[in-house]
Image (cartoon, rainbow, N blue to C red):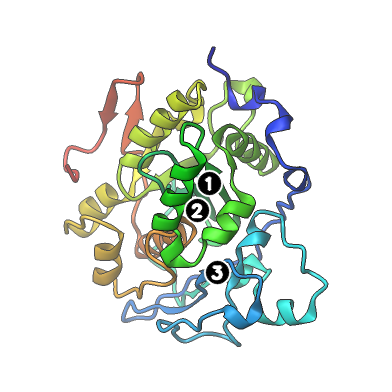
Amino acid sequence: MYRSATAISRSFLPRAAYSLSFGSLSSITLSVSPFRTLSVSASLSTTQHDPSSTPIPSNKTNTIGRWKPMCLYYTHGMCTMLDDTAHLEKFNHSCSEELRVHVAELKNKRSQEFDYFLVLDLEGKVEILEFPVVLVDAKTLNVVDLFHRFVRPSKMSEQRINEYIEGKYGQLGVDRVWHDTAIPFEAVLQNFEDWLAQHRLWVKEQGGHLDRAAFVTCGNWDVKTKIPQQCTVSKMKLPSYFMEWINLKDVYLNFYKRRATGMTTMMRELQLPLLGSHHLGIDDAKNITRVLQRMLADGALIQITARRHSLEKVEFLFENRIR
């Protein structure tokens, strides 16, 4: 029997997940100089609660104040060291400091069809391992909030999971926090729907579609392919808010008249330095957000590029697109 995310029992969730804090981020200002260069302040994500183990990033640029990495336990509402002075001094617990891009002029910015964009970048090839979403205000370009969950596979043995996580996240130094915080996909979607509802972007009783918001991805894979696959594995009905999305690569191609096959290509062409760890979902989502902010500042119209009519049938709305 297939179940919706809202029908999943709360028994899936660890006690700490019930008290997750979804406070909004402080406003983030994006700024472009007359030469279209960006002054960026951001931090790498980290998982170690031991302050002495935190590496100093090599790609830190023009920061305001002293750089501090984000505590990934905090993004899950599970940090237990908020009263530890040394921990607070070493780690960032304010999401407003995670991503700070300054914009000097917004004269090219145009009105958008949506009020908010949900930048999504999944990780995990066999099953989804990470589900990060950055909420961006289309009018101000501010980042409003961030949702982040590590996802525990449901069809893999513990030995295979350990091998999988060591291979995927061990090299990034986040395998420990993954094991400490990961929850099943069903529970992740329940948390996500609660988060959407808090921001008044989704109401189950109104058909379950997004209200005034749209997903933004770097490619079609995340929403077209992986979400439906994971729903099948987890024996869930595909939520109706995953029926359309914006492939930023297609918008980029039509706006700048240049082909970009991925996030790093777009960032290189826009002269945006890569921040954080590539293929750590939360960092990739933030970097894609920076590309989106730059495109909005440059005057791009961010429109739906794909719409799902059934599990098998997807309509691509841009004739000129990345294939």
Q: Quadrant of residue 259?
A: bottom left
Q: Which mark is residue 138?
A: 2
| Amino acid type, callout 1 | Asp
Secondary structure beneath label 1:
loop
Residue 50 visible at all: yes
Q: Quadrant of the N terminus?
A: top right
| Residue at image point 41% right, 84% down | 58
| Residue at image point 42% right, 34% down | 227
User: Taking 150 as reference, is 34 left or right?
Assistant: left
| Residue at image point 61% right, 62% down | 72
User: Which mark is first along the chain, 2 or 1?
Assistant: 1
Residue 57, placed above or below residue 49: below
Q: Residues within 10 Å of mark 1 (few under 14, many from 20)?
A: some
User: Taking 84 as reference, is 130 left or right?
Assistant: left
Contact, mark 3 vs mark 1 (Cβ under 8 Å) = no
Q: Can you identify the residue that label 3 sits on?
A: 46
Name of the residue lying farthest toward the right: 83
Residue 172, placed above or below residue 11: below
Q: Quadrant of residue 9?
A: top right
Q: Can you identify the residue that label 1 sits on?
A: 115
Disc 2 to disc 3, how far (Cα)?
Answer: 29 Å
Contact, mark 1 vs mark 2 (Cβ under 8 Å) = yes
Q: Residues within 10 Å of mark 3 (few under 14, many from 20)?
A: many
